[in-house]
Structure formats: C-alpha cells, structure tokens
Image (spheres, rainbow, N blue to C red):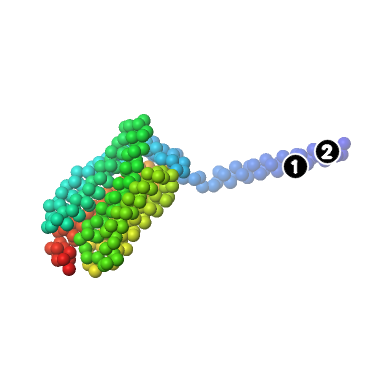
Amino acid sequence: MKRILMFWRKESLLSEDQSLLATLRSSLAATRMPAFSLQKTKFAKFMNHRAPANCRYKPTWYEHAANCYTHAFLIVPSIVGSALLHRLSDDRWEKITAWIYGMGLCALFIVSTVFHIVTWKKSHLRSVEHCFHMCDRMVIYFFIAASYAPWLNLRELGPLASHMRWFIWLMAAGGTVYVFLYHERYKIVELLFYLAMGFSPALVVTSMNNTDGLHELAWGGLIYCLGVVFFKSDGIIPFAHAIWHLFVALAAAVHYYAIWKYLYKSPSADLIRHL
C-alpha cells in the first residue's frame, strides 16, 4: 500500500512538473518576437510562396503584369537609342559596333517581354514557355558581350587586352551551351557565370589609357549587382523580379549614356581610335 501511495505521489509530482513546463513554454512562445513574413500581411496577394530549390517561382497575376510592362516600355527607347548611335557613327567600324550594341540592347528587352507574356498568358504551352525561358537566359550572355563591345572595339587596347574582344563572345557562347545542357538545374552556378562574365572584361577596360566614361561604367555595374539581390528574392519581396527589371533598365541607361557621350558624341573619340 505504501508503494502504491509513493508511486501515486511521484506520478502527481511528474504531471505537475510537466504542466508547469508546458506553461513556461507557452509563456516564452508568447513573449518571443514572431518571425516577420510578408505572406501574413496585406501584401500577400502580390506575392506567392518561395519556390523550392531548382524550381521556378510562380508569380501572381500582378507580378506577371509588372514583369511584362517593366521591359516592354523600354523596347522603343532601345530601338531609338540604337538608331541614334548608328546615326552618329563616322566610319564603318563605328556603325558595326553600334549595330552589335543595339542588337544586344533591343534583344534583351524584346526577348524578356515576349517570355513574360508567354509565361503569363500561355503558361499551358509548356514547351513554348520553356523555349522562351531558355532564350531569355541566353540573351543575357550576349547582352553583356554587346555592352562591352563599344569599349573594346573603339578604344585603344594593349596586345593582351585586345584578345578580350573575341574572348567575351566565346564566354557568351559557353553560357549558351550551359543553358542548353543545365537549364534551371544549378541556379547559383548560372548566377556566378553571369557575374564572372560581367566583371572579367571590366578588368581590361579599366586598364585603358583613356579612362573617360569608366566612372559611369562602374556605376552601371554596381546597379546591376544591387539588382541581383531582387533577382534572387522571388517569394520574399513582392514584385522582386519587376524591381530587378528596373535595376537592369537603370544600369543599361547609365551605360548607354557613357557610350553615347564618350565614344560617339565626344569629338576626341575619332582621334583616340587612330592613335
């Protein structure tokens, strides 16, 4: 009988300890700062949950519209700007370079807009959507190469640095092959490839004797890098991809201004190329 009473007392004490522990846990949970999530706010309708690893994020209707319009509105300005550079060209090499740069600039906004329209309105056409998504990724490599073409073609370079004129296009071709083989499989590798391709020619450009326009070139590169934060924030920040588009547009505008001012509009540009 004593053993039964002792066992009962132990069980009652144990249950009291467990209830006390549960009370303490609930008190701590109540006082703990809750994890902030935009999914629990009024902005939830503007953003879906973050996609799993190696899967594509599915934008909301609002995000689809923003993704389309943020680049669609830049198609006409990019065409006009390209035509202006071609008009300002004084020789055949300048015209070829303006054509290369203009094609890369226009292709970026056109392909991006078409891809986002297909994703928004024709998402049931999986093969078509997949094809345009690959084109959207591939055109970025050629846009980077085209953005450096005016600096590499129209400025005096050293014997080793001059090889970057063709090597950057080799990198663009390598990026295209990578998209064909490993599209959407290793996103961080793809991002590092973009950054490496963006920074490698910059080392050559900054070594030129004539440094006019390099500050604008550096500012544009910094804007691109800041935009990458939003490029990787789908499902965390509403309209993250559209904000990334705005960073791209701003950086491209800064680079275009530098090319127009220092390589085409500048009266000393022709003298520099014939040194």
Query: Mark 1 packing: few (<14 Cα in 10 Å), some, or many (20+)?
Result: few
The answer to whether 214 appears left or right of 119 in the picture is left
Distance in Å between CA atoms under marks 1 and 2: 12 Å
Q: Tell me: residue 252, above or below residue 267.
A: above
Of all residues shown, which one is farthest toward the top?
124
Q: According to the image, label 2 marks what residue?
A: 5
Residue 121 in the image: x percent, y percent?
32, 32
State which quarter of the image contains the C terminus.
bottom left
In terms of image quadrants, where is residue 109?
Answer: top left
Q: Secondary structure at mark 1?
A: helix
Residue 222 in the image: x percent, y percent?
32, 57
Query: Dots 1 and 2: beta carbons under 8 Å?
Result: no
Ranked by sequence position, the earlier of labels 1 and 2 is 2
Query: Mark 2 packing: few (<14 Cα in 10 Å), some, or many (20+)?
Result: few
Residue type at tag 2: Leu
Identify which residue is drawn at 38% across, 48% down: 178
The answer to whether 8 appears left or right of 144 in the picture is right
Identify which residue is drawn at 25% across, 65% down: 157
Q: Nearer the viewer, residue 70 or 163?
A: 163
Residue 197 visible: yes
State which quarter of the image contains the N terminus.
top right
Residue type at tag 1: Leu
The answer to whether 215 appears left or right of 33 in the picture is left
Identify which residue is drawn at 24% across, 69% down: 209
Residue 43 in the image: x percent, y percent?
39, 39
Q: Secondary structure at mark 2?
A: helix
In terms of image quadrants, where is residue 21?
Answer: top right
Identify which residue is drawn at 29% across, 54% down: 169
Q: According to the image, label 1 marks what residue?
A: 13
Residue 44 visible: no
Residue 172 in the image: x percent, y percent?
32, 52
The label shown at residue 126 is none
